[in-house]
Amino acid sequence: MKILVVIPTYNEKENIQKLAEKILNLNLNLDLLIVDDNSPDGTGEIADKLAREYSPVKVVHRSGKPSEGLSRRDGYRYALMHNYDYIIEMDADLSHDPEEIPKFLEQIREWDVVIGSRFINGSKQVGRNIFRRSGSHLANLYIRKMLNIKGIHDCASGYRCYRSEVLERIDLDDISFTGPAALIKTLFRCCQSGFKIKEIPITYQERQSGKSKKSSPGFIIEALWTVFKLKCQN
Ligand SMILES: Nc1nc2c(ncn2[C@@H]2O[C@H](COP(=O)(O)OP(=O)(O)OP(=O)(O)O)[C@@H](O)[C@H]2O)c(=O)[nH]1
Ligand SMILES: [Mg+2]
């Protein structure tokens, strides 16, 4: 089985090398794709250096207006073009623990999509304040209710594993610009297509280095608007 870990990056110079080495040290025989949006802090150059040093590391440099959603999409396209069987995605900021990758790989043998959840029995959130936790809970309630998503509690989780057939089937041209909206829409398309989705608990560590890209209200508005549009269209 060919496995690719897709990591979108924007200004992650403090984190990307640490994360890449943690993943490679698991010795799981997988490749790693860093999709960088021409980060001003030099993350792209660090990614290139990692690719020269470690053959499983691949890099895609994007140009134009940075977009987490379109970076994820370019990662999926790369995976399909290069015939990977399982595609894992995770954030670069060490919020997602690479040690949990084997759990995803175990489950993806029986399921089409595996979602790492912050909100089910066995999940942990480290360093997240009560406002962020409650905000995420409320957002998930809204998403689930509006889109009639059953059995999934973390609809915008960026720690996931897909079988390649899933990404072949859903419309990648229709992906949203910002990260949360893109993740929600992709999940919704997976549910609509009837794929078998499993949620597993993860330990989520709040970002410790680097800056959050989600401080502007634009991200929340796009996510809520995306959900509303999906509801009206379907
Ligand atoms: N390529 C690309 N990656 C991005 C962009 N914005 C964010 N990312 C990456 O997407 C992942 C998730 O972004 P984060 O900023 O960690 O978002 P978050 O986890 O919702 O919020 P915080 O951790 O609080 O910042 C990280 O790996 C980011 O580096 C972007 O515009 N382009
Ligand atoms: Mg983060």
Image (tube, grey):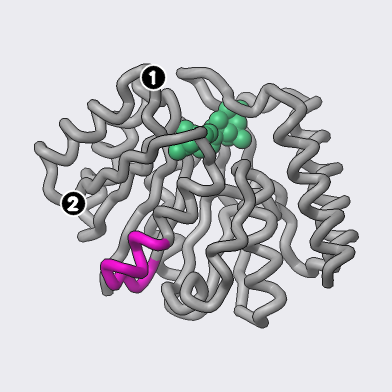
The first of marks 1 and 2 along the sequence is 1
Q: Which residues are magenta?
A: 77-86
Q: Which mark is residue 87?
A: none
- Amino acid residing under circle 1: Pro
* Residue 182 appears in the rendering: yes
Left or right for 116, reference 224: left
* Label 1 secondary element: loop
Residue under label 2: 56
Q: Quadrant of the N terminus?
A: bottom left
Within the image, what quadrant is residue 220 found in? Answer: top right
**Residue for point 34% across, 63% down:** 79
Within the image, what quadrant is residue 92 found in? Answer: top left
Residue under label 1: 40
- Amino acid residing under circle 2: Pro
Q: Position of residue 112 (x, y in %)?
A: 52, 76
What is the residue that sits farthest to the front in this orientation?
Answer: 64
In the rendered structure, does residue 136 fall within the stretch colored magenta?
no
CA gap between label 1 and label 2 equals: 25 Å
Would you place residue 215 above or below residue 57 in this image?
above
